[in-house]
């Protein structure tokens, strides 16, 4: 009986072991799958984090590059503006040197960071502030210069106008003076001549005469200065020769010594005055005699008389 109770079926045990192994394998496979999935998720997360970090770094780099380019552009603009001022001011020259040095430093810079960018931006801002201050001063000086130029032009116009008025006034005064001077010149009128013999009687034949008497009147003139006048008489014969004495006297006429026939002093008081001047000679001939009368350095009258 004992043998019958404990007589097990070997095939049944073999089937049980096989089922157990299959379950363990399936369980292991599920475990590996979970691990693989977890590793895949972790790897994906790490990849995404790496990608994001890399992209952020790239973006930061691009921003730094843009900031760097912006600073370089601003510096270049400042240098151009400083250079365009073309002043010899030591302060401006020093700022220009500083800007150039910063530009060179920027070109040499290889590694960038945010703090360095901000430092350069601050320095550029300082330079730009100084630049704007100088530009304001220059604009103020230019405005003042334009104002002074405008005032100078205005003063020049006023001076030119005043000079023109003075010239016109002087010209008018000169013209008036000339008119007054010309108006003050004495005039001789009603000029005539007669022949006289030795008894001072008139004769009809000039060849019988020993004296020629010239009669005329000096017209009144309120502009002339009253007083004594030396009146000079010049008589020219029909053949054009000046009748004069052996001493051949002369008088000054407009800076030249001029011969005359006879002279007489006349008291002139701005009223008409009749005057007669005598010339004594001989050898008179028939014909046309020319007569000229001078006083005060002026020719005051002239005429001609036909003598038989």
Image (cartoon, rainbow, N blue to C red):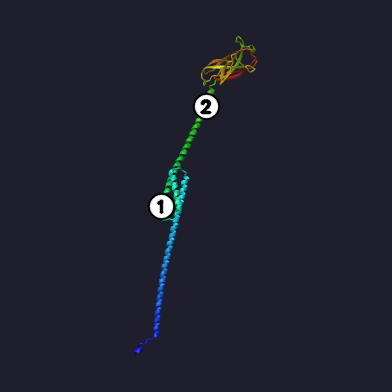
x%, y% of residue 305?
Answer: 62, 17
Please identify the quadrant where the C terminus is shown: top right
Apparent side of residue 98 relative to residue 194 in the rendered image (left or right)? left
- Few, some or many residues within 10 Å of mark 1 (<14, 14–19, 20+): few
Judging by the rendered image, the residue that carries numbered circle 1 is: 119
Give the tally of numbered discs.
2
Q: Secondary structure at mark 2?
A: helix
For the point 40% across and 71% down, the residue is: 35
Is 238 rendered above or below residue 156?
above
Report the disc number at residue 174. Answer: 2
- Kindly tell me whether residue 189 is visible in this rendering: no
Nearer-the-camera pick, 281 or 21: 21
Q: Secondary structure at mark 1?
A: helix
Residue furthest to the top? 199
x%, y% of residue 258?
Answer: 58, 18
Residue furthest to the bottom? 1
For the point 39% across and 77% down, the residue is: 24
Please identify the quadrant where the N terminus is shown: bottom left
Residue depth check, mark 2 versus mark 1: number of the one nearer the observer: 1
For the point 48% across and 35% down, the residue is: 156
x%, y% of residue 106?
Answer: 45, 52
Quarter of the rendering containing residue 90: top left
Nearer-the-camera pick, 298 or 122: 122
């Amino acid at each position: 009986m004992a043998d019958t109770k404990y007589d097990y079926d070997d095939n049944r045990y073999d089937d049980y072991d096989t089922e157990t192994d299959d379950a363990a394998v399936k369980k292991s496979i599920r475990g590996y799958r979970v691990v693989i999935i977890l590793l895949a998720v972790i790897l994906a997360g790490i990849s995404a984090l790496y990608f994001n970090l890399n992209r952020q770094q790239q973006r930061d780099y691009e921003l730094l590059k843009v900031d760097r380019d912006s600073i370089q552009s601003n510096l270049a603009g400042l240098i151009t503006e400083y250079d365009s001022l073309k002043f010899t001011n030591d302060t401006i020259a020093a700022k220009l040197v500083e800007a150039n040095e910063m530009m060179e430093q920027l070109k040499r810079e290889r590694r960038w960071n945010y703090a360095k960018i901000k430092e350069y931006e601050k320095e550029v801002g300082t330079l730009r502030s100084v630049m704007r201050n100088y530009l304001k001063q220059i604009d103020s000086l230019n405005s003042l210069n334009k104002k002074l130029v405008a005032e100078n032009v205005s003063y020049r116009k006023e001076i030119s106008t005043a000079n023109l008025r003075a010239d016109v006034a002087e010209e008018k005064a000169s013209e008036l003076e000339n008119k007054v001077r010309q108006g003050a010149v004495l005039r001789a009128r009603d000029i005539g001549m007669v022949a006289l013999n030795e008894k001072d009687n008139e004769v009809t034949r000039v060849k019988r005469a020993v004296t020629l008497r010239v009669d005329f009147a000096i017209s009144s003139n309120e502009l002339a200065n009253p007083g004594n006048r030396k009146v000079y008489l010049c008589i020219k014969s029909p053949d054009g020769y000046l009748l004069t004495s052996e001493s051949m006297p002369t008088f000054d006429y407009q800076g030249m010594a001029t011969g005359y026939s006879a002279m007489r002093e006349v008291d002139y008081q701005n009223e008409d005055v009749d005057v007669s001047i005598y010339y004594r000679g001989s050898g008179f001939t028939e014909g046309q005699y020319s007569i000229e009368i001078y006083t005060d350095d002026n020719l005051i009258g002239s005429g001609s008389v036909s003598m038989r």
